[in-house]
Amino acid sequence: MDRGPASPPPTDAELATFYREHLQRVILPFWLGRTLDEERGGLFNCVDDVTGERLSDDKFVWSQARWAWTAAHAARMAERGLLDVDADRLRRHARLTADFLIEHAFLEDGSVAYLLTADGAKKEFLPGKGHDISFYADCFVALALAGVARATGEEAYLERALEVHGSVRRRLASGTVRSEPYPLPPGARAHGWPMITLNVAQELERALRAFGDARHRELAEAALGDVDDVLGTFVRDDGLVTEVVVPGDRTSLLARHVTPGHAIESMWFVIEQALAHGRDDAALEAARVIAASFEAGWDPVHGGLFRYVVPGPEGPQPAGEPNGPFERLIVDTWDGKIWWPHSEALYAGLIAVAALDALGGGDPDLRRRLREVHDRTFAYAFATFPNPDPGVGEWIQVRDRRGRPLRRVMGLPVKDPYHVTRNLLLAVELLEEGLPARTTDC
């Protein structure tokens, strides 16, 4: 069993070593040894969360694209000596996965299918609902292609990524995006919309800069517009993030709940973009939101972050009869302790502290709270999530409130290759190369 110490190593160098070794011994071997489709591209990640046994050959485009970005980014880190893994293998498979997506995932109108078979045939996830049921799949494909472009030096991938990004922006502007299997009521807007377009635009900006393409300025402006949308539309006076803005509705569960892990993830996107472009005000506000979201989401009894909470005296448990599939998800899974919010809090806590230090230190109490975001999450996550069977590895990603394995679907029916791997990779970059590696030099 590969569990970490009760508290993080005392120095940045030792913490970087811990995260690097966890990636190399526990996380990446699972994906590289068990899941890759070396012939067609992509990965088989419809697997049992505990045993790693394959349950289906289906390929969810969302996950395939996330893997392509992750493999491409890890390859570039390995080439810089930050990771002791086979960069050529990672880059080759990232390219193979991108090619698989280009060949099979796109529909005639340029949007992206949600689900494919092993050999790339389009398959309906929700019978009768069609193939393009979630624009988030399109966004992850854009991220994948931008990442593969940087890893391979091939601009054609980047041009295709820009096309996908443009298509997503147009559909969002026209109100024609779909977000199944949890659709929103008419007129509602999700915090996840500008959050994901921010992440896509900033990755495209970085790729364009790497290729010396002047269009990076347009993407920077788009991403900064998303920063202002996230902070101006969704951040509440108490520093928490409204997950769904429903016009004329402040009382439904959909309008009242918050998703602490999502807010924490969103805010490190904001910090990176803000610091890269001199928006110190936005970076400081995002740091405050990280601290507030962590405190609102932390389970005082068993530790760890709740999936959903209702802030205030009536919470944290969401109460009432759910109206629709989104509210049903909130009520049924609110107290789950799942992998991705914890991995997001690890990286967000580190970069928020680094941002505060770079901006002159600021409020020492805020700095202490932000350090706790990382340190308390570290102690909980590494005592809870790593699979106790070293022959399997990775994390058991879905846990109940007490931290016990919970065999139920929370999102896609897959084991996810993205959040843990991505955030540990970014933590190593930040700790080894400093804040500019994740902002101005990213």
Image (cartoon, helix red, strand yellow):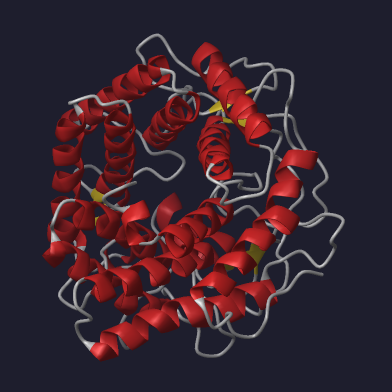
Q: Residue furthest front?
A: 81
Residue at left 62%, top 14%?
Answer: 121
Q: Nearer the viewer, residue 4 or 307?
A: 4
**Rendered location of residue 16, percent (x, y):** 56, 66
Q: Is residue 321 visible?
A: no
Image quadrant in which the N terminus is located: bottom right
Quarter of the figure with residue 393:
bottom right
Residue in the picture at 50% in, 89% down: 300
Answer with left or right where residue 2 lies relative to residue 121: right
Question: Which quadrant of the structure image shows residue 261?
Answer: bottom left
Count of numbered badges drawn on the protein: 0
Residue 422, percent from left and from top:
52, 51
Q: Quadrant of residue 187?
A: top left
Compared across the picture, whether 347 is left or right of 244 comes to right
In the foreground, 3 or 213: 213
Q: Is residue 415 visible?
A: yes
Report whether 252 appears left or right of 133.
left
Relative to 379, say whether 60 is above or below: above
Image position of 105 with respect to 366: above or below: above
Which residue is pictured at 34% across the width and 63% down the height?
263
Image-based side of 168 in relation to 29, left or right: left
Q: Nearer the viewer, residue 376 or 71?
A: 71
- Name the residue rendered at 38%, 59% in the picture: 265
Which x, y percent locates residue 202? 28, 41
